[in-house]
Image (cartoon, rainbow, N blue to C red):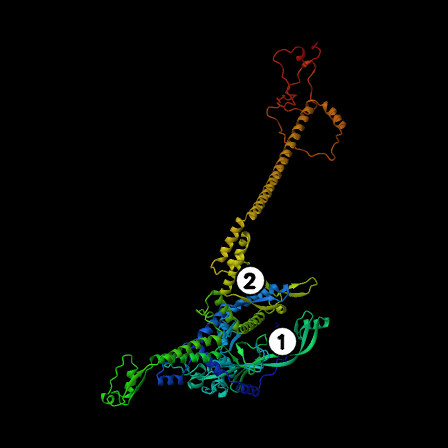
């Protein structure tokens, strides 16, 4: 269902005139009278079943007042059935998967409004008069108190509301008007209508005149039915305002009425239909591009006005985004010709009266005494004799003179055969109440005529079938209440960005949905993602049973199905079974069961072990690779240091050799060239080895050629050649020192003495 507010410059219809209001009041007066009968039926359901005149006659004849209320428990059983089969609203996408997020977010907001607005309590309260007398009303409106929740749902008594009874639709969508009258104090009315405060405060008291100036008096008056003879119940809530002049209250009439106007509608290709707004650039662009088509049509406008007698206090367009009355009717049954509502109590009144009178007659018959006596046979007055003969310890004194006369007699008779007939009639009355009401003893939780569980279940199902129409009407009214609350929630969301966190349950985790998210497509066009206003065509209401009895039935059926499953499948279904149980900590239990199930399953355990081993092997492989890379880096650094040291050492050794034997340098150069060595260009880096200025104990040597040892073994001049130091390297053996004794032959440096 699509609810769209009309444009600001749209035609909202004309205000209601005094003449039209007077015609509506006359129509109310001419409507069929059914409220007095409905009040009587409601009294019977409440246990007030004895008429005042009947009680006086029973008292005069000595019949004790008796009452066995069978109607009340029957209606209470139906109300209990409604409570046990109660459902929740759920918003579902209407065939479009793209609207799932919006539907889930709206479903969360709708369930919140259902709890905080007390919608379930209001609808349950309206269900009792729906079943008993045929009609109950629930108001869905904005809360006038800003400190409370924004949406308000309340049960409204049927006698406060009158409607266009010519309407044929159950949701009153074709009704022309609906009004509600209520008596409030002058001060409160003056606060509500400050511009009319002087008129309200100067108005004379209307106590005793009633709403509409005393013309409409049908319904709301005392029925005269009492629960007992000593009960003082002579006025109702409405009568107190009618007859108490000191109440100083005024009757305010809230009138909702419809106007029909001609408008231009913009029909889009996707099926969306909105009222054309000439000031909206998007509407004009849609028409110019051919995405939408204009059509003239007649639409309805809802208006609201307040009246105090013939005085108009306020008149304006409806403040709600939907075109419905804020009062949702819950119908029981309706007559075919007059459309007068009625309930189950209508046909149960006569059997109830018959049962009450049968019990009274039976009690009277059990205690009744019939006497036949001649005049003057007793030595007391007639009144004294009647009181004495009714006593269980009656002591009657006879007049001996009168009894001595011929034909005088005194006889006391008790007729118990009549009591048996009355007892049978009482049993027939009880059976008649079940027949006309279709509410069996098994449906009321009592022991009936069933001799087995199957028979008792059959009788319960028969009672449910008999009230199927009643429950369908209640379901339609409940869906209507959900539609109105959903329309208010969508209006609150508007086109502003809204982040909604949907709470999780035992199965599904919590998630976040962003509504009216401004985004930009590839072409640069701005639009709203999860647009609530456009998604209203994609949502629909469906009922989801949420009562404990329904969950118990689901749990029982699921348990029977799980018994036939293999053990591994039973472990999988176990969390869903626990979700249907009313356990205080079922979330923790489900988590523990899931963990235990994953550990005890051999196949999953094997897979988990393999995964853990693979993960461990990968971690170890990565660790080894990291260690190998680190070791290689250290080895390369050590090799670099070693290579540099060896190169420096070799350079030093080569320098020492060249210094000792300069003649080997040209030969080494030729050998290097023959091996393919080429001098670097540019030259290499200078190692810049540090050298001290003078070695300890050394003699400075003047620059110049180094003298070689002379022939014949003569040593060089002192200090010309530094002292040879010992060398332990195997590649460079130490130079032998001079022998301590004279050398001979090969030991000498000359070759001439070797032979």
User: What crowding class fits label 1: few (fewer than 14 Cα within 10 Å), some (14-19), or many (20 or more)?
Assistant: some
The location of residue 356, given as percent across then percent down, is 41, 79
Question: 49 or 166: which is nearer to us?
Answer: 49
The location of residue 142, given as percent across then percent down, is 53, 74
User: What crowding class fits label 2: few (fewer than 14 Cα within 10 Å), some (14-19), or many (20 or more)?
Assistant: few
Q: What residue did someone put label 1 on?
A: 6
Q: Name the quarter where the N terminus is drawn.
A: bottom right
Residue 675 sits above or below residue 586 on the image = above
Q: Is residue 147 left or right of residue 487?
A: left
Question: 43 or 273: which is nearer to us?
Answer: 43
Whether residue 117 is visible: no
Point out the residue furthest to the front here: 406
Q: Name the quarter where the C terminus is drawn.
A: top right
Q: What residue did someone put label 2 on?
A: 501
Which secondary structure, mark 2? Answer: strand
Residue 144 sits above or below residue 705 on the image = below
The location of residue 398, given as percent across then percent down, is 24, 86
The location of residue 498, given as percent across then percent down, is 58, 65
Task: Tell me the quarter of the picture where residue 716 sits.
Answer: top right
Disc number placed over residue 419 in the picture, else none: none
Question: 401 or 157: which is nearer to us?
Answer: 401
Whether residue 54 is visible: yes
């Amino acid at each position: 269902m699509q609810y769209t507010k009309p444009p600001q410059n749209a035609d909202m219809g004309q205000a209601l005139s005094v003449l039209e209001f007077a015609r509506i009041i006359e129509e109310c007066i001419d409507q069929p009278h059914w409220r007095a009968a409905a009040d009587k039926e409601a009294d019977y359901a409440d246990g007030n079943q004895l008429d005042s005149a009947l009680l006086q006659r029973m008292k005069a004849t000595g019949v004790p007042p008796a009452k066995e209320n069978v109607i009340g428990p029957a209606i209470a059983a139906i109300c209990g059935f409604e409570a046990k089969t109660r459902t929740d609203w759920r918003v579902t996408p209407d065939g479009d998967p793209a609207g799932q997020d919006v539907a889930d977010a709206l479903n969360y907001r709708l369930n919140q409004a259902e709890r905080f607005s007390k919608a379930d309590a209001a609808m349950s309260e309206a269900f009792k008069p729906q079943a008993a007398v045929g009609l109950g009303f629930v108001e869905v409106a904005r809360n006038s108190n800003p400190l409370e929740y924004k949406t308000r749902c309340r049960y409204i008594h049927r006698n406060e509301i009158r409607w266009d009874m010519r309407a044929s639709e159950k949701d009153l969508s074709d009704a022309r008007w609906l009004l509600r009258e209520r008596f409030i104090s002058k001060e409160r009315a003056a606060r509500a209508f400050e511009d009319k405060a002087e008129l309200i405060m100067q108005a004379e008291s209307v106590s005793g005149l009633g709403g509409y100036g005393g013309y409409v008096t049908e319904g709301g008056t005392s029925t005269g039915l009492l629960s007992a003879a000593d009960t003082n119940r002579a006025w109702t809530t409405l009568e107190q305002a009618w007859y108490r002049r000191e109440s100083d209250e005024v009757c305010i009439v809230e009138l909702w009425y419809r106007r029909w106007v001609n408008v231009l509608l913009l029909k889009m290709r996707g099926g969306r239909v909105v009222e054309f707004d000439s000031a909206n650039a998007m509407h004009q662009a849609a028409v110019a591009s051919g995405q939408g088509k204009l059509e003239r049509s007649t639409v309805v406008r809802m208006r609201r006005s307040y009246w105090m007698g013939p005085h108009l206090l306020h008149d304006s367009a409806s403040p709600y985004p939907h075109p419905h009355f804020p009062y949702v009717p819950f119908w029981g049954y309706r007559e075919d010709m007059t459309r007068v509502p009625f309930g189950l109590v209508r046909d149960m009144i006569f059997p109830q009266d018959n049962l009450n009178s049968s019990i009274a007659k039976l009690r009277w018959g059990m205690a009744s005494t019939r006497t036949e006596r001649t005049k003057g046979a007793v030595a007391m007055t007639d009144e004294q004799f009647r009181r004495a003969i009714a006593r269980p310890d009656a002591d009657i004194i006879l007049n001996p003179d009168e009894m001595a006369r011929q034909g005088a007699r005194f006889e006391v008779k008790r007729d118990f055969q009549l009591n048996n007939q009355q007892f049978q009639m009482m049993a027939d009355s009880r059976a008649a109440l079940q027949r006309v009401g279709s509410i069996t003893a098994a449906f009321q939780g009592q022991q009936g005529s069933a001799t087995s569980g199957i028979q008792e279940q059959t009788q319960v199902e028969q009672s449910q079938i008999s009230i199927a129409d009643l429950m369908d009407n209640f379901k339609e009214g409940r869906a209507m209440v959900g539609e109105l609350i959903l329309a208010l929630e969508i209006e609150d969301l508007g086109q502003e960005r809204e982040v909604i966190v949907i709470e999780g349950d035992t199965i599904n985790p919590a998630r976040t949905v962003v509504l009216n998210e401004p985004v930009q497509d590839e072409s640069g066009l701005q639009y709203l993602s999860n647009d609530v206003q456009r998604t209203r065509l994609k949502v629909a209401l469906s009922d989801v049973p949420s009562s404990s009895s329904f969950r118990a039935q689901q749990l029982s059926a699921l348990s029977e199905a799980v018994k036939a499953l293999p053990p591994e499948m039973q472990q999988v279904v176990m969390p869903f079974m626990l979700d249907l149980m009313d356990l205080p900590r079922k979330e923790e239990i489900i988590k523990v069961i899931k963990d235990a199930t994953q550990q005890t399953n051999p196949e999953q355990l094997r897979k988990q072990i393999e995964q853990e081993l693979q993960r461990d092997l990968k971690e170890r492989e990565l660790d080894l690779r990291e260690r190998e890379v680190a070791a290689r880096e250290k080895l390369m650094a050590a090799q670099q240091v070693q290579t540099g040291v060896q190169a420096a050492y070799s350079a030093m050794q080569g320098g020492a050799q060249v210094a000792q034997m300069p003649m080997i340098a040209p030969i080494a150069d030729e050998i290097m060239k023959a091996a393919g060595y080429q001098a670097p260009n540019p030259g290499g880096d200078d190692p810049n080895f540090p050298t001290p200025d003078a070695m300890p104990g050394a003699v400075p040597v003047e620059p110049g050629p180094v003298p070689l040892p002379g022939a014949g073994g003569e040593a060089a001049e002192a200090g010309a050649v530094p002292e040879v130091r010992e060398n332990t390297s195997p590649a460079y053996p130490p130079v032998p020192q001079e022998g301590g004794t004279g050398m001979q032959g090969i030991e000498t440096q000359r070759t001439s003495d070797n032979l």
